[in-house]
Image: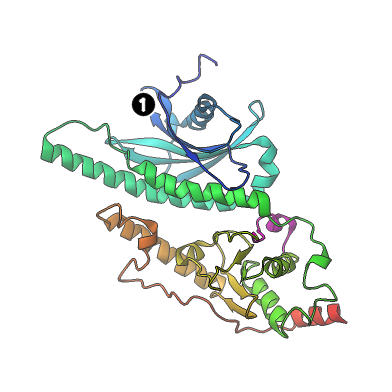
Amino acid sequence: MSTLCPPPSPAVAKTEIALSGESPLLAATFAYWDNILGPRVRHIWAPKTEQLLLSDGEITFLANHTLNGEILRNAESGAIDVKFFVLSEKGVIIVSLIFDGNWNGDRSTYGLSIILPQTELSFYLPLHRVCVDRLTHIIRKGRIWMHKERQENVQKIILEGTERMEDQGQSIIPMLTGEVIPVMELLSSMKSHSVPEEIDIADTVLNDDDIGDSCHEGFLLNAISSHLQTCGCSVVVGSSAEKVNKIVRTLCLFLTPAERKCSRLCEAESSFKYESGLFVQGLLKDSTGSFVLPFRQVMYAPYPTTHIDVDVNTVKQMPPCHEHIYNQRRYMRSELAAFWRATSEEDMAQDTIIYTDESFTPDLNIFQDVLHRDTLVKAFLDQGAG
């Protein structure tokens, strides 16, 4: 190691995450800039595997690399810088979000990063926007958490007359863990079930034998029309994985190859969770024949979504894109405001913050019937059936 490199971070805490499938992610890290020692790694999250792909020392070295040169960072308050490193000599890519925050009473620079093998570059690029959006919101919540933790420690010092502050910032790690794990699970599920770039027409309902037989009259027309109206974003639910995936592939015919790689087939054995940011995703209903979409994740999707139920042949859609973005930003602000006002860790749990602001009551009935009909899709289907 070069003498110019910072000394290794001592005793870096590590959390190993058990994932059901193969993980393309090597690790996620949380690092900060120490004004005396330089970049230091605060925590490491890594998938639990039998084969150790990167040692803790290597992960620490790579994470330190993301904060090198940030001592002169002069960003606006609240800014989050996204940096993309391709380290060919190490065979890895690093996506790092750099931000400022308060910890131990001082304003410092922090980095939340994910590390992947360079061989996964083509797999990751279509998912870059999804991951950055997820990490960005984690940082928004993390800043509030760090500030509240600092306030609590200052109050303890005043009340107890002690100068012990070594535990400050500790509780941010469980919060980050709860947010980082879903990102790792998303990448793992996309590695095994993403839609291929090339789709065989025989695997879709546009196959001659399927049009009119496997789809209720008007159902496919409504599904494709609404799918296009909601910017190519749809969630397909049902009890049969084969039927769900057939509709997923059909809708993906109307996406670009890169957008298909940001879409996911459903798993036959067990249902994946809904993931905001994917273009098309298939989800299985539970044993009772029901499926509940998480309101928070649906609101955080970058585009409105079409909801398609292949069991009852229904198609619902969210409001148009401009309305969705307006409602989304209001919900984000109100959620963060509620997070700021929370007085306990239980109150700050993401699942409890739904009705967040008295001035903004979200409409939980966000999926409505398809109101706007079109003739283009009908003509396309009639031509295909002819």
**273 sits left or right of 14 in the view:** right
Taking the magenta stretch, the answer to whether it contains residue 139 is no
Q: Which residues are the magenta region?
A: 255-267
Could one spot residue 128 in this view of the protein?
Answer: no
Could one spot residue 324 in this view of the protein?
Answer: yes
Given the current orientation, which residue lies at the most extreme top position? 3
Q: Name the spot of residue 246 as percent of width and height, x first.
A: 73, 68
**Tag 1: amino acid:** Asn
Q: Quadrant of the C terminus?
A: bottom right
Q: Nearer the viewer, residue 242 or 318?
A: 242
Q: Compared with residue 309, is residue 96 higher up or lower down, i.e. above or below?
A: above
**143 sits left or right of 179 in the view:** left
Taking the spot 58% from the left edge, 61% from the top edge, the residue there is 271
Q: Compared with residue 127, is residue 287 higher up or lower down, i.e. above or below?
A: below
Q: Secondary structure at mark 1?
A: loop
Prevailing secondary structure of the magenta residues: loop
Q: Nearer the viewer, residue 312 or 363?
A: 312
Q: Name the spot of residue 319 as percent of width and height, x first.
A: 53, 75
Q: Nearer the viewer, residue 99 or 194?
A: 194
Q: Compared with residue 218, is residue 1 higher up or lower down, i.e. above or below?
A: above
Marks counted in the figure total 1
Taking the spot 62% from the left edge, 66% from the top edge, the residue there is 233
**88 sits left or right of 295 in the view:** right
Q: Looking at the rendering, which quadrant does residue 309 occupy?
A: bottom right
Residue beneath disc 1: 35
Taking the spot 22% from the left edge, 44% from the top edge, the residue there is 152
Q: Nearer the viewer, residue 239 or 163?
A: 239
Q: Name the spot of residue 1 as percent of width and height, x first.
A: 55, 16
Q: Compared with residue 22, is residue 333 higher up or lower down, i.e. above or below?
A: below
Given the current orientation, which residue lies at the most extreme front position? 287
